[in-house]
Image: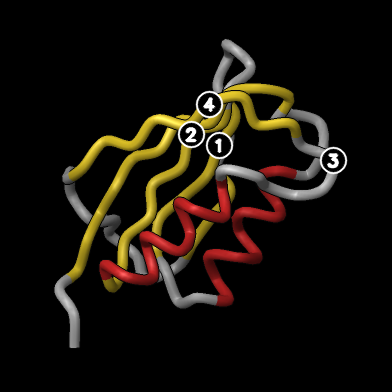
Amino acid sequence: MSATRTVSVIITGRVQGGSYRAWTQAEARARGLSGFVRNQDDGSVEALFSGPAEVVDQMVALCRSGPPSARVSDISVREGGDPPDTSQFEVLRR
């Protein structure tokens, strides 16, 4: 079993208004990750992924393209942080 990895991700580009959050939630839940996704006031999307390191890596890679309606221009990943208090993956309000 691999170690748990937690990362905070900021996705920029045309990522709001095209189901990016719902897509992220569905993909993360399908992989058994915990965390959250939410829109930011600057037009970006923020996500926190926590779970097995290789699964978190897969999710970060998926976020580089996102759903078909998204146009991701950049993604920044920050390691660490506290794992979420829940085992669920949720869409949060700003």
Compare residues 62 and 20 and report the one nearer the observer.
Answer: 62
Task: State which tag comes first along the sequence, 4 or 3.
Answer: 3
Q: Verify CB contact (< 8 Å) between mark 1 and mark 4.
A: no
Q: Which residue is mark 2?
A: 46
Tell me where residue 3 sits by quadrant: bottom left
What residue is shown at x 28% (from left), y 73% (from top)?
A: 52
User: Disc 1 and disc 4: Cα gap in Å?
Assistant: 16 Å
Q: Which residue is mark 1?
A: 38
Task: State which tag comes first along the sequence, 2 or 4.
Answer: 2
| Secondary structure under the numbered disc 2 in the rendered image | strand
| Secondary structure under the numbered disc 3 in the rendered image | loop
Q: Verify CB contact (< 8 Å) between mark 1 and mark 2.
A: yes
User: Disc 3 and disc 2: Cα gap in Å?
Assistant: 17 Å
Q: Verify CB contact (< 8 Å) between mark 2 and mark 4.
A: no
- In the image, residue 13 sits, relative to residue 9, either above or below, namely above
- In the image, residue 28 sits, relative to residue 45, either above or below, namely below
Give the amino acid at mark 4.
Asp
Task: State which tag comes first along the sequence, 3 or 2.
Answer: 2
